[in-house]
Image (tube, rainbow, N blue to C red):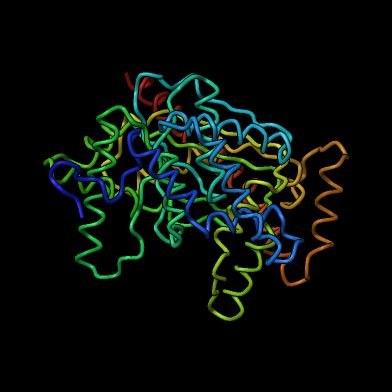
Amino acid sequence: MPNQTDPFKDIRPYFDHEVPEAICRLLDDADFLHAILNYRLASWPKTIRYLFTPVLRWLLARKAKGLRSVSDVQHMVADFLQQSLQKSSAGVSVSGLEHLDPKQSYLFISNHRDIAMDPALLNWCLHQKGMDTVRIAIGDNLLKMPCATELMKLNKSFIVKRSIKAPREMLKALSHLSAYIKDSLETGHSIWIAQKEGRAKDGLDQTDEAILKMFFIEGKKRGLDFATYMQSLNIVPVCLSYEFDPLDQAKANELHQLASTGEYKKSEMEDIQSIVQGIVGQKGRVHVHFGEAIQACCQEPAALAAEIDRQIWAGYRLYPVNYLAADMDVELDPGEESLWYQTKMASLPEELRPYVQQMYAAPALKQQQTLAQQEQLATQHKELEDGTAHQL
């Protein structure tokens, strides 16, 4: 629970002075070491793999010897991410960073397609531009193993307590989280949080108003109205566009199970496997678009959610696979993307194909709809201005 000297200790990331001890705990964690061995030496018999535990611990201790601060950890993560992206992507592009002030803290709200890569890519883009990285919101459902908690808190992640069920305790936890987010922004630390709980497995990104209401809990405590308080948070919508989703089949299987049986039960290590596959799996081209800070804030959560969605969908980078899945009449150069999509669909079990098609088609269809609505509103606004000018 929070205390007077360190009110957010139960959810906040580690401070610099806590880094060495956290690394020592990781190096002494058998689950952490075995998880690495299971991944790196997957084809070896388990008994043989685990004989290498002392060697792995020594190698990791040697690599971590110079890690004394959060910044040290972040630089190591940046190096790892750069190597990983060279193998698992066809390059990362970015747009919209010119709208951001490096001296300002922001509340970045993004669409959510990948557990680890979404905030990692946002941080990567900020780091490349010499800007400070963000504190990352992560649900406690992903922190079932102590080593996962250590790793996330070392990498500037703070905990969202989703597992609480009692209404009174949940309200208390949400109020605590709301206060922490505002405190972070006021002390110069930007925040990343997904636009809703859980990934958008169907490709339809949509902001959950409950997230915005959670932000406002602290605003209510301060006696501010919704629009004034939300404007003070410097909300910036962010859109992450992956050409290929390394977890498309797994997501389709979950959706199919839910549709056919009404439930889906995750395996014990499924979240960890999803994180690993999301990092190492082929993503093709990746684009990160930073929207503009929302200054003219809306009076209601629904209107603010709609503006966040508008910026996200307008900033989506579409690829040939999206147009192919949506069967849109767009002139495309025949190439590897078309072959990839045809091969992907042919390789899937028949019952999963509609879900994968929907997953890749949704961005193209939704962006088309969003841009059409924007054009219609612009036309109406111009007609209104012209009518007013004529009357004058």
Name which residue lies at 71% across and 68% down. 352
Q: Residue 153 in the image: x percent, y percent?
A: 40, 45
Name which residue lies at 80% across and 51% down. 341
Please state if 356 lies on the left or on the right of 80 as rendered: right
Please state if 155 lies on the left or on the right of 91 as rendered: left
In the image, residue 240 sits, relative to residue 129, either above or below, namely below
Figure disc tally: 0
Q: Nearer the viewer, residue 268 or 209?
A: 268
Q: Nearer the viewer, residue 77 or 44?
A: 44
Name which residue lies at 61% across and 43% down. 368
Q: Quadrant of the C terminus?
A: top left
Q: Nearer the viewer, residue 192 or 75?
A: 75
In the image, residue 204 sits, relative to residue 125, either above or below, namely below
Quadrant in the picture for residue 47: bottom right
Quadrant in the picture for residue 135: top left
Please state if 232 lies on the left or on the right of 27 as rendered: left
**Residue 378 visible to the viewer:** no
Q: Residue 148 in the image: x percent, y percent?
A: 47, 54
Q: Residue 361 in the image: x percent, y percent?
A: 68, 52
Please state if 34 lies on the left or on the right of 145 as rendered: right
Q: Residue 199 in the image: x percent, y percent?
A: 52, 55
In the image, residue 127 sits, relative to residue 329, either above or below, namely above
Quadrant in the picture for residue 125: top right
Residue extending furthest toward the bottom: 261
Q: Quadrant of the N terminus?
A: bottom left
Q: Nearer the viewer, residue 194 or 19?
A: 19
**Residue 15 visible to the viewer:** yes
In the image, residue 267 sits, relative to residue 197, either above or below, namely below
